[in-house]
Image (cartoon, rainbow, N blue to C red):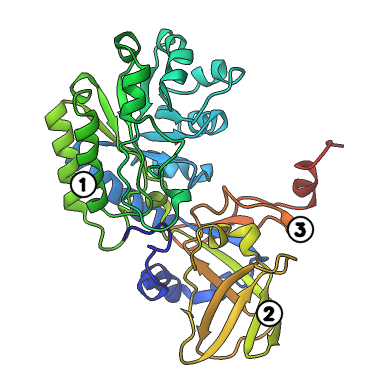
Amino acid sequence: MSTPHTDRPPAASVAPPFAALAERGGAALFSQIPSPAYVIDEAALLRNARCLAGVAERTGCRILLAQKAFSNYDFYPLLSDFLAGTEASGLFEARLGREEMPGKEVHVFSAAYRDEDFPALLGYADHIVFNSPGQLRKFGPAAKRAGKSLGLRINPECSTQDGHAIYDPCAPGSRLGTTRQVLDREADPELLSLLDGLHFHTLCEQDADALAVTFSAVEEKFGDLLPRMQWLNMGGGHHITRPGYHLPLLEDIVRRAARTYDLTVYLEPGEAVALHAGYLICRVLDLTENRDTRIAILDTSAACHMPDVLEMPYQPPLLAAEAGCGDGSVYRLAGPTCLSGDVIGDYTFPTPLREGQILVFGDMAIYTTCKNNTFNGMPLPDIWRMTVDGRLLRLTDFGYTDFKERLGRRS
């Protein structure tokens, strides 16, 4: 439960997101969509949003959308009815949250703010979290005069993850958050008086047991500061909407923190908002072999369209197939780019693949549309909306101009 992204449920356990597709006709539902394309499932988003709203209602916490995982703003009006606002990682996301979820809170955290951006940021953000005493000292007074609620990201130095240190904010030498040693050395009472809240974000796709361990560490190292705060942001990485997540434990932790320290608790999940709420539609371009390995070249790319597959790494669920080598027709699914490692993974199919066949990857709403790229001149997939009643509406139309204009002078 503690390894980033490899902690995702295996393909066999994520069948429920595909069950609704089976009822509507399976992959044939997308036969008229040019591929590759992302399809975001409105009904799945609503299911997740209602689950999160239930947590907020039962505990009194406030839940924000972490836009770094899902920033498809066409769906912000839908989510706005269930969430308190947005969490941003900088100026552009803060502006997006303000413009597309009006009337809701905008929180922002950055490891460091740019001098030239900060005045504009003050026009969008309600809560501003600083990563260090130095940044708080530099920007805090101006932000306070502008009426903003200020926070400091703390590092409880309590790692609950195994494996990939790159995704562990509490790994030794991490740049994220202020340790107690640094706080005691660099923050005087006058500086601390600027603070309205504390923020920690240490989890990655984890259950509430990891939060329990982390919060104990926060109390041990920073508990003396909590009674002086108005709010505590427990960050993201909470897989709240995943089947089997320990909701009662999460809610107990939130209620205890709020009651003990008389503060408002914020959660800022990104993945939990859009978990299993999107698909990546693609087609088989070619079938080939290398020794004992059968290979299917797709019109989508792990490197370009689902970068977490290589970065984490992890293997996404696939409709009507099983991840790994089993009984049936096994193929290595790969992209068309020149990168040798542009491989999505090995999958077992009940029957042999054929050229032109439609494949549907699941869990493709998170860290895809906001993270993809045009390496090798690969086109960005269009983005479609699947409404609650099953209609497919195209939201974007990417093409050559989008590729060209991000690389040079606009003509």
Name the residue at 65% across, 74% down: 283
In this rendering, which labeled residue sits more in front, label 3 or label 2? 3
Q: Where is residue 145 shown, x and y percent of the image?
A: 42, 7
- Given contact means CB atoms under 8 Å apart, are the residues at marks 1 and 2 in contact? no
In this rendering, which labeled residue sits more in front, label 1 or label 3? 1
* Residue 39 position by quadrant: bottom right
Q: CA distance from mark 1 to mark 2?
A: 49 Å
Q: Check disc 2 and report the residue beneath it.
A: 356
Badge 3 element: helix
Q: Where is residue 138 shown, x and y percent of the image?
A: 48, 14
Q: Check disc 3 and report the residue beneath it.
A: 376
Q: Amino acid at mark 3?
A: Asn
Q: CA distance from mark 3 to mark 2?
A: 22 Å
Name the residue at 48% across, 49% down: 166
Left or right? Give the position of 53 relative to 103. Answer: left
Name the residue at 41% across, 70% down: 20
First in residue order: circle 1 vs circle 3 = 1
